[in-house]
Amino acid sequence: MTGTCHHRRERLRREAEAQLRDRSLPTWQHRVLQRFAVEHENGWFPLLHRSAPHTPADRPDAVLVGPLGVLLILLRDEEPGWETSREAFVWAAERLAGASIGPGMLTEAAARTVLVQPAGHRGRPSNTGEHLTITDGELDRILRRGERVLEEADVQAIARHLDGRTFDLTPIMWQPRRIPQQRGPGRTGGTASPFDIPDPRREQVERAPERLFPDWRFFLDGTQLGAVRRRYSGPARITGPAGTGKSVVALHRLAYLARRTTGRLLFTTHLRNLPLIAEEQFRSLAPQLAQRIEFTHLHAWARDFLAGRGRAAEVDEQQVEQAFNAVWQRSELTETLRNFRPVRGYWKDEIDRVIKGRGIRSLETYRSVSRKGRGANLPPEFRAYVWQFYCEYERALSERDAFDHNDVLMRALAEIERRPLPRQYTSVVVDEVQDLTLIGLRLVHAISGDGPDQLLLVGDGQQQVHAGGWRLSEAGISLRGRGEILRRNYRNRLAITERAGELDAIDRFDDLEGGPTVSLRSSRPVLRGGQVVEWQGRNQEEAVVSALRRLNDNSSVAVLTRTNGTAEHWEKVLRAAGFAVRPVGRWDGRACAPIHVGTVHRAKGTEFRSVFLPGEPLPSGRYREEREALHRQRLVGMTRARDFLWLGTVISSCGAPSRSTTRSRGPESGSSPDPT
Ligand SMILES: Nc1ncnc2c1ncn2[C@@H]1O[C@H](COP(=O)(O)OP(=O)(O)OP(=O)(O)O)[C@@H](O)[C@H]1O
């Protein structure tokens, strides 16, 4: 330490001593607060509870705002119970609410509670995860080590905000009035026009891409934070186009509710890998609350629930396939169906999504049901053939003593109706709700109940992969306008949003609900730039491999396909070209060298810097609903890309040269290769 530095710290210590003189603090607490005061020179702004050392148990004794976040300090000889510690956190979080800083609105994830005990203290920490416990000899752990999350101007804005929100906290060693006003984001001085009216919202958003610590954990925009904190008197829905932060908001809301309630919370969806991704992200957001939340896909939940009630329900996929094939091969049953629609998958979907997916139990009901989004209008007399086919499928299943995924959900629902769940979850969040079956939706509703904040549905109709043609009201769910629409796209750069917005991806889901729809086309991308390469030619394998080799940054790349078969093909091609490959289902959000390969369906909930969508054989495209489904699927694939999108079309005409066109949007095109 230099002489001047030592001298300055000594002066600060003496000033702090003068400020703390009137408080009859125990010596060790005095030492700790003096240290906090001295840290002001390193960018920390301490505030002391006005009653310290007689602070009410459920309030922090001090709050420190600094580059590493907001620390809520408990100075205690004895370890407080977790409820007390949590109440102190919530009290401070309520006062921090609404703190608006450069990158957005501050979230609770920027704050953590720290229990400081006197050195030599022998009590054993309870390890509830509510707070970090250290002794007064270990203050460097919280003041010097850790992730830097706030910029200097933001620290000052938060400190000032806190001071303005409560008389219970008193600044020590700094005076709010003496802090220079925070500069407008992105402004470096100069003369502003007298007619300039600053629009803080616009400034925050424009600054988002270039900010120092871009992190959805610490900052959200105003609409997002509103959706996190709002109290909904019944089921609610968060919707918005791809990349607008729906999943991020769902995670923050879980953390917010977990902190203010007791009991368990459930995050579920019909996708197998999404709960794993969500759990991983939640751990980085609020590790201490992770054990309160169950992350599971709905079928696994139903299976475990039935097992808990002594009713095994393991699906044998092979048996299910065999049962379906056995019936599909019986021409006397399928001839009429094949003449109408030759594709096997269409009739499989009819059973999975419409008949069983909607829990239809009689031909009469099936005859009258609306099948919106399923294409062809099936006349009632024709439906008798489909029904017969379905009945034979059921028979084939029972001959094999097998059941399919719909049966598991139906059994779970029937079991809950027979013997309701004891009040099991405080709150249930369902992601990608647009692709649930009606039975799935009824099941989550039966699990959650209708009470305040008990059910949150998150989804986007434009990304629907399976049309089921149901309405929320058929599951007994009434939203009454509760919910939020998110519009700012934080993921896809402008060029990518524009290209994906050209797709005619009709939102059947919101169409059915009659609610307002916001399409990707009308979302507002926050990130400028981006590059889209559209390639046409015959040797697509060579084109993809050479474009991959030209990428500036290949730490986050995916090759996405429509079918599993095509994904296997690309896996082989890439391995043969020397690339490391990993299934897209194993994406964990971290940048890594292997190229992720898999179907678009598997890629839901993921995102990459660069995405390749090679051309592949498509269904006939003769039918409207087929075309619609393809567009929606393509939209999901394209919107997984942040900076760079490669779209391939294979042409078969002999001798036609390959060509590629490139659309770039400005200099921020990320990992784009040279497209020539
Ligand atoms: N306020 C924010 N500030 C910065 N980044 C954000 C913010 N909100 C979301 N993001 C980022 O935007 C990306 C998209 O978020 P998220 O996956 O939650 O969107 P989504 O609406 O669920 O997308 P999709 O429907 O396409 O799956 C993520 O990288 C997320 O970290």
Image (spheres, grey):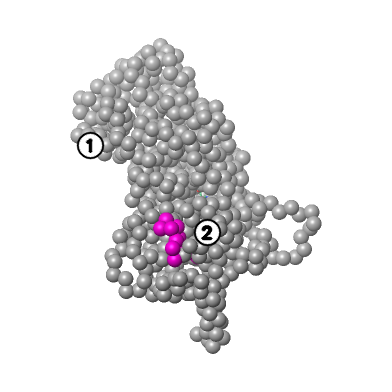
Residue named by callout 1: 307
Q: Residue furthest right?
A: 194
Image depth: mark 2 or mark 1 in front: 2
- Local secondary structure at mark 2: loop
Q: Which residues are magenta?
A: 53-66
- Distance from mark 2 CB to nearest ligand 1 atom below 8 Å: no
Residue found 23% across the figure and 37% down from its top: 308
- Going by the image, does 370 lie left or right of 656? left
Q: Nearer the viewer, residue 115 or 418?
A: 115
Query: In the rendered image, which quarter contains the C terminus?
Result: bottom right
In this rendering, does residue 526 appear at all?
Answer: yes
Extreme top residue here? Answer: 381
Q: Give percent across and percent down for residue 649.
A: 52, 43
Q: Is residue 367 above or below residue 325?
A: above
Q: Is residue 507 magenta?
A: no
Q: What secondary structure is marked by label 1?
A: helix
> Which residue is found at the position 31% from the left and 63% from the top?
125
Disc 2 marks which amino acid? Answer: Asp
Dominant SS type (magenta): loop
Residue 331 image point, x, y percent: 31, 19
Q: Nearer the viewer, residue 76 or 543?
A: 76
Identify the residue at horizontal 36%, vertical 71% (top origin).
Answer: 118
Numbered label attached to residue 196: none
Q: Is residue 597 visible?
A: no
Q: Residue at x 57, y 55 (%)?
A: 165
Residue 643 vs residue 484, the one in the foreground = 484
2 relative to 395 in the view: left or right: right
Circle 2 sits on which residue?
A: 168
Query: In 3D space, how far apart are the residues under numbered discs 2 and 1 (Cα atoms)?
Result: 52 Å
Q: Residues within 10 Å of mark 2 (few under 14, many from 20)?
A: some
Q: Is residue 622 above or below residue 607?
A: above
Q: Say what amino acid the circle numbered 1 marks.
A: Ala
